[in-house]
Amino acid sequence: MTQNKLSLFVKQERKKLGLSQVQCAIYAGVGLAFLRSLEQGKTSLKMDNVNKVLRLFGAELGPVKVQDR
């Protein structure tokens, strides 16, 4: 798995708050395996769980325009 913008955002924000992966998972109400998968860039994740993590950082998933390749 390769890191993407979402996974990098989560990892950076978690570290800014000084949280371990275990602490972050607990505060967000998700499993540790889920958080690790998110930070590693897994491409198929439950959106509701992603939003639980993002809410810790004042963010949520939303549509983003993609640039033509």
Image (cartoon, grey):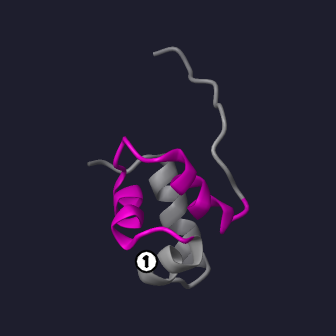
Q: Position of residue 21 (x, y in %)?
A: 43, 77
Q: Residue furthest top?
A: 68
Question: Does residue 18 sit above or below 33 in this rendering?
Answer: below
Q: Position of residue 55 (x, y in %)?
A: 67, 62
Q: Residue furthest left?
A: 1
The front one of 58 and 66 is 58
Q: Position of residue 56 (x, y in %)?
A: 66, 68
Q: Is residue 2 magenta?
A: no
Q: Is residue 33 magenta?
A: yes
Left or right, residue 60 beside residue 42: right
Q: In which quadrant of the rendered image does the C terminus lie?
A: top left
Q: Residue at 41% x, 57% y: name it.
A: 38
The front one of 34 and 9 is 34
Q: Residue at 34% x, 48% y: name it.
A: 42
Q: Which residues are magenta?
A: 29-58
Mark 1, other Cα within 10 Å: few <14 / some 14–19 / many ≥20: some
Question: Does residue 49 sit above or below 62 in this rendering?
Answer: below
Left or right, residue 62 beside residue 47: right
**Residue labelled with disc 1:** 21
Helix, strand or loop status at disc 1? helix
Majority SS type along the magenta span:
helix
Q: Residue at 42% x, 65% y: name it.
A: 35
Q: Residue at 38% x, 62% y: name it.
A: 34
* Amino acid type shown at disc 1: Gln
The front one of 37 and 67 is 37
